[in-house]
Amino acid sequence: MGSRRNFIKKTTVAAIGMSLPSSINAMTAKSYNNILGANDRVNVAIQGLGRRYGAYIPAIVNKENNVRLKYLCDVLDSQLDKASQKVSEKIDYKLRQEKDIRKILEDKDVDAVFMSTPDHWHTPGACMAMEAGKHVYLEKPCSHNPHENDIVVAFQKKYNKVVQMGNQQRSSPQSIEIINEIHNGIIGKAYKAIAFYTNGRGEVPVPVKAAPPKGLDWELFQGPAPRKDYTHDTWDYNWHWYGWDYGTAEMGNNATHELDIARWALEVKYPEYVDVVAGKHQFINDGWEMYDTMEATYKFTNDKVIQWDGSSRNGYSKYGRGRGTIIYGSKGSVMVDREGYELYDLKGKLIKESKSGGSEGGTALGGGGDLSTLHTVNFLDAIRGKGELTSHIEVGAISQMLTHYANISYRINKGFNVDGNTGKIFDREAMKLWTRAYEPGWEPKL
């Protein structure tokens, strides 16, 4: 295995150094000093076997990608067993099960880890993996808070690993095409984007103290978060809405995707001002502890604006679809989503459209689709030095900051100014939420 790891195709590494985006200074050929040879097998593990893990399986089991899935990891026995049974039907070798990711990271044969855990695990888990010499496919949100944004990028730079953020629309051929055209002036000067998401999520139970479900390692589930008693139905997706120990609300859960497209299209970095109007308006007496409706405004230099319009539990589709991003320009506008794009002139006439016909366009829970498969293959190609990442962690982390700003604005109930170059907040009260409390020994540190 050692000789395999030391085999590096210098030509492909040099090629990656030449083709990387100029905005990612850290991504040079030198920084990819652990890339595998182009034809080498990539041994991987998946951490987190809930609704998202299936998105990686088509690319992993495709023999053309030369991947071996060595481990499945989850803190709940039933999810481990269910996923093992399902995946075993698609492969011809034996999988290994493990509840504790730290044991998997000790295996030097594992090249990369796919992380699809609850949000509070993302940055600490990714940092542990990089420190152990693994490449990481890191699901959104890539961080639980702004401090973790800084840390996960710093770890990537130190350990020089391939770290792909899981905002898969960055790998959409249609999105890439139309955003390149926007940058080339097809709608004139792009000055505003509206990113939106609508869902009809239902009522959730009021949390009550209970024994953890059978087979759940509650200690490992909490991981980096401060220890507390288990409450009924926390583990099964509702951790998203039960306070800030584990989740990042709908901003981290879904706004990540569309805000990233908006920022990409407008070619902006950090905003200079952020403000939100948000609240809990549906099922007032249920267990949901955060906002379920949010409108956020981000003001950037050059009079550019991004607005977020999110409704988690009111299914009225004011934009004619469940999710997407509208980009306005001086000469026209574009509607872009996971299915493709529509280009309009100033009179609202449809000029051009392109649809993928793919399977990942809606708001349904779980699964994956063509974009996730493209994104996974892109990650594997980058590990082998065959191409550049479509969503390098340094780029993804900037978009993730937009979600953190909105959550902080909601929590302190006011807007604030931001340093457009560094991303730091000019508000003492807001800066108190820059990081979070960690269980002793779990905070990632360089």
Image (cartoon, rainbow, N blue to C red):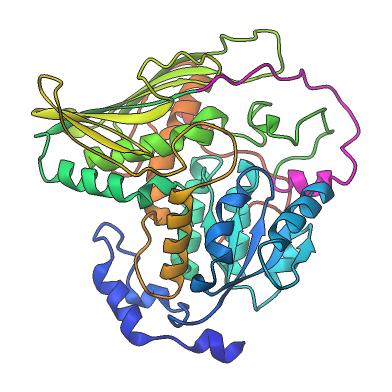
**Dominant SS type (magenta):** loop
Residue 213 colored magenta?
yes
The reply to whether the magenta stretch includes residue 339 is no
Residue located 36% across and 49% down the image: 170
Residue 165, percent across and down?
A: 46, 52
Front one among 427 and 235 = 235
- Residue 206: x percent and y percent? 77, 17
Residue 329 seen in the figure: no
* Farthest bottom residue in view: 3
**The C terminus - image quarter:** bottom right
Visible residue check, residue 325: yes
Residue name at image x 44 percent, y 25 percent? 322
Q: In the rendered view, does 390 fall on the left or right side of 53?
A: left
Up-down relation of residue 46 to residue 37 (above or below): above
Q: Is residue 36 left or right of residue 79?
A: left
In the rendered view, would you say 19 is above or below 350? below
Please state if 279 lies on the left or on the right of 175 as rendered.
Answer: right
Question: Which region of the structure is painted magenta?
Answer: 199-224
- The quarter in which the N terminus is drawn is bottom right
Name the residue rendered at 37%, 42% in the picture.
357
Residue 104 image-quadrant placement: bottom right
- In terms of depth relative to the viewer, which is nearer, 402 or 321? 321
Q: In this rendering, would 240 be left or right of 158? A: right
Q: Is residue 109 above or below residue 333?
A: below
Quadrant of residue 218 within the rendered picture: top right
Q: Residue 297: where, in percent of width, then height?
A: 34, 22
